């Protein structure tokens, strides 16, 4: 049995990647709904009702960016149905984040739910869910790291893209950093000064940690100077968070 497969049901494999993805969603749902109970403008029911919008947007966006980025490597000479084959992974987080935010905005505006309050509730849970998802990446063998001689190096099987060479467990690095971000955002949520503050903190924090994690990645090419695609997006996300924080802080002071 492949190391990527947890078990089989009636001959159909169940992958660790999918299990960790599902656990991430459940953890996000549970923590987010509990966090919503601490607010007066977004209910737990409204938070849970957003999930179909979030999931559809996230899956479509994450897969779309992966297909666009790796078209020549995995899809150019394959049947078009391979685009919809999620079993072995093939998702890019930033595509899911951007599209997921867009679909969630539609839900929030349609139901007249305060946008910044909702995203403040969701942001810590997003970091937690992402941490569990990265553990799935580690088991799956995707998003692997650069070769290393450090004791932290991990060896995937010979038939893996790394050919058995020791590589950085960068997926676990990012999982740990996301857990730290989750703890910080959880604390800040209970002490926030204005709506949107936690959302801005998430953008800044994740932008920084993702830029750092990419330094250890071994499966992504440089697309501009010495930067990877994810690093460029991470910089944009970080700058967006800083701009959002300045704007919201100034707007809050002006209203006061």
Image (spheres, helix red, strand yellow):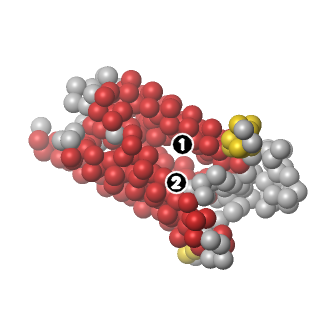
Q: Is residue 221 above or below residue 52?
A: below
Quadrant hosting residue 70: bottom right
What residue would you read off at disc 2?
93
Judged from the image, the secondary structure of the residue bearing numbered disc 1 is helix
Residue 142 x %, y %? 69, 54
Q: Nearer the viewer, residue 250 or 89?
A: 89
**At 52% from the left edge and 59% from the top edge, which residue is drawn?**
63
**At 32% from the left edge and 27% from the top edge, which residue is drawn?**
44
Cα gap from disc 2 to disc 1, whole angstroms:
9 Å
**At 55% from the left edge and 75% from the top edge, which residue is drawn?**
224
Quadrant assignment for the N terminus: top right
In-image side of 50 versus 230 (left or right): left
Quadrant assignment for the C terminus: top left
Mark number, residue 130: 1
Judged from the image, the secondary structure of the residue bearing numbered disc 2 is helix
Q: Give the mark nearer the N terminus: 2 vs 1.
A: 2
In-image side of 71 versus 161 (left or right): left
Residue 32 x %, y %? 40, 30
Residue 28 x %, y %? 47, 34
């Amino acid at each position: 049995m492949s190391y990527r497969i947890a078990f089989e049901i009636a001959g159909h494999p169940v992958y660790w990647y999918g299990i960790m993805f599902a656990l991430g969603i459940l953890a996000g749902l549970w923590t987010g709904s509990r966090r919503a109970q601490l607010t007066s403008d977004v209910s737990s029911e409204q938070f849970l009702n957003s999930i179909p919008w979030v999931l559809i947007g996230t899956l479509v966006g994450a897969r779309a960016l992966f297909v666009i980025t790796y078209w020549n490597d995995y899809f150019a000479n394959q049947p078009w149905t391979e685009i919809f084959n999620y079993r072995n992974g093939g998702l890019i987080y930033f595509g899911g984040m951007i599209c997921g935010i867009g679909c969630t905005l539609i839900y929030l505006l349609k139901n007249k739910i305060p946008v910044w309050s909702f995203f403040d509730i969701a942001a810590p849970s997003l970091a937690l869910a992402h941490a569990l998802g990265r553990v799935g990446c580690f088991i799956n063998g995707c998003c692997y790291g650069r070769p290393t001689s450090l004791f932290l190096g991990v060896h995937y099987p010979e038939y893996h893209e790394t050919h058995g060479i020791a590589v950085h467990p960068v997926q676990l690095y990012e999982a740990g950093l996301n857990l730290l971000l989750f703890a910080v955002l959880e604390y800040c949520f209970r002490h926030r000064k204005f709506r949107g503050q936690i959302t801005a903190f998430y953008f800044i924090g994740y932008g920084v940690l993702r830029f750092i994690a990419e330094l250890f990645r071994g499966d992504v090419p440089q697309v501009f100077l010495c930067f990877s695609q994810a690093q460029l997006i991470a910089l944009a996300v970080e700058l967006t968070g800083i701009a959002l924080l300045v704007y919201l802080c100034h707007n809050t002071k002006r209203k006061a």
